[in-house]
Image (cartoon, rainbow, N blue to C red):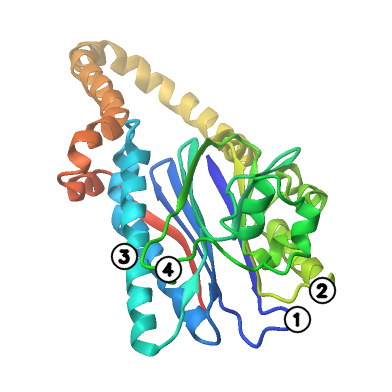
Amino acid sequence: MQFIEGYVSEKGNVRKSNQDSLFVIKAVKGADTILFAGVCDGMGGYQFGEVASKECTCSMVNWFRNSLPELFSGRDAKWKERVYKQWEELIQQVNKRLVDFGKRTGSSPGTTISCLLFVRDEFMAANVGDSRSYAINDQVTQITRDQSMVADRVRKGLITQEEGKNANYRNILLQCVGVNDDVEPDYYFGKIEPEMSFIICSDGFWHLIEDGDMIKRLQSRNIYNKMVLQQNLTELANMAMERGERDNVSVVGITVTANDDTERLDEPEIGDTEQLDEPEIGDTEQLDEPEIGDTEPLGEPEIGDTEPLGEPEIGDTEPLNEPKIGDTEPLGGLIPGFIETREEIRIVEEVILTA
């Protein structure tokens, strides 16, 4: 899978500061790509919400950097279980630090978090609060479930979604990082389909944006490159503010494309190169034919000798490249540095946007 990503974060119409934070970080190893992105919506008054969202964002980014060797090597079915345990521990640690900070300063710093991790053809999501993650193709699917009083009452059938929009408790969260001694994140798993888009957003984005708005601008067939995605995300954020949104507005967009789409982009270049090289090859063949003819009888024994030697090299190379990842399963958890020396892991994009 290949990814096109973009992001927008705006202070909005009313707030004096932007307490949202977001991150997008992408790493590659050979032809394998892993992407991690998230949005944190800080709360707790001026400065304190910024502290909370920044702390959560930076902690998640540091986790990703330190976990890369394991993420790239873990092809077994238990990788999600390992990530779940690591995220659970990490979010609890961030929660404790923020609670302790609040006690020392007499404040109540808190933040939501919604994040998505893309590994090969699967994704994993974590969510605390009412920031959201969506999947978009011909329809919009909300991946995460709001941890809010309104969402809880809607799920129980006590009110409708329309009634929830105007409820006087619509901003009350049931879970938040940094407010209570314990926090209970929700986790989600799913398959990544080619030509699918995802967004992660704060409530300031989703309050006034309809499903049709997202489908029209974020379906993968409408996203040709990064510039188009960025323009469409900006248009949606502006639309939310024009419709009267009072909160900060933040969104990360990710469009998934198949690997062979990238190859098709390269075909014209290959075609041009072949046409340029053909005359040179033709000239070379005519010049070399007499030499090849002379060397064939002499070269046969050498070729005969080298074929058995050459086959093992080719044969060895193919399995070495395939089981590189397979070999890294046992080795990855023990000596990840050894894996990196065989095929370099590179962070190719990193965006960390905090107040």
At label 4, the amino acid type is: Cys
First in sequence: mark 1 vs mark 3: 1
At label 3, the amino acid type is: Gln
Residue 176 image position (x, y, % from top left): 49, 65
User: Tag 1, which secondary structure?
Assistant: loop
Measured Cα–Cα span from mark 1 to mark 2: 8 Å
Position of 66 with respect to 234 (left or right) is left
Measured Cα–Cα span from mark 1 to mark 3: 34 Å
Residue 301 in view, yes or no: yes
**Cβ–Cβ under 8 Å for marks 1 and 3:** no
Question: Which mark, by number, is residue 13?
Answer: 1
**Cβ–Cβ under 8 Å for marks 2 and 3:** no
Residue at the disc numbered 3 = 93
Along the viewing direction, whichever of 315 and 234 lies nearer the viewer = 234
First in sequence: mark 2 vs mark 3: 3
At label 2, the amino acid type is: Gly
Position of 62 with respect to 303 (left or right) is right
Q: Residue furthest front?
A: 158
First in sequence: mark 4 vs mark 2: 4
Question: Which mark, by number, is residue 56?
Answer: 4
Classify residue 89 by image quadrant: bottom left
Circle 3 packing at 10 Å, graded few (<14), some (14-19), many (20+), is some
Q: Is residue 50 above or below residue 308?
A: below
Residue 254 in view, yes or no: no
Measured Cα–Cα span from mark 1 to mark 4: 25 Å
Residue at the disc numbered 2 = 244
First in sequence: mark 1 vs mark 4: 1
Residue at x-position 18% and y-position 39%: 331
Circle 1 packing at 10 Å, graded few (<14), some (14-19), many (20+), is some
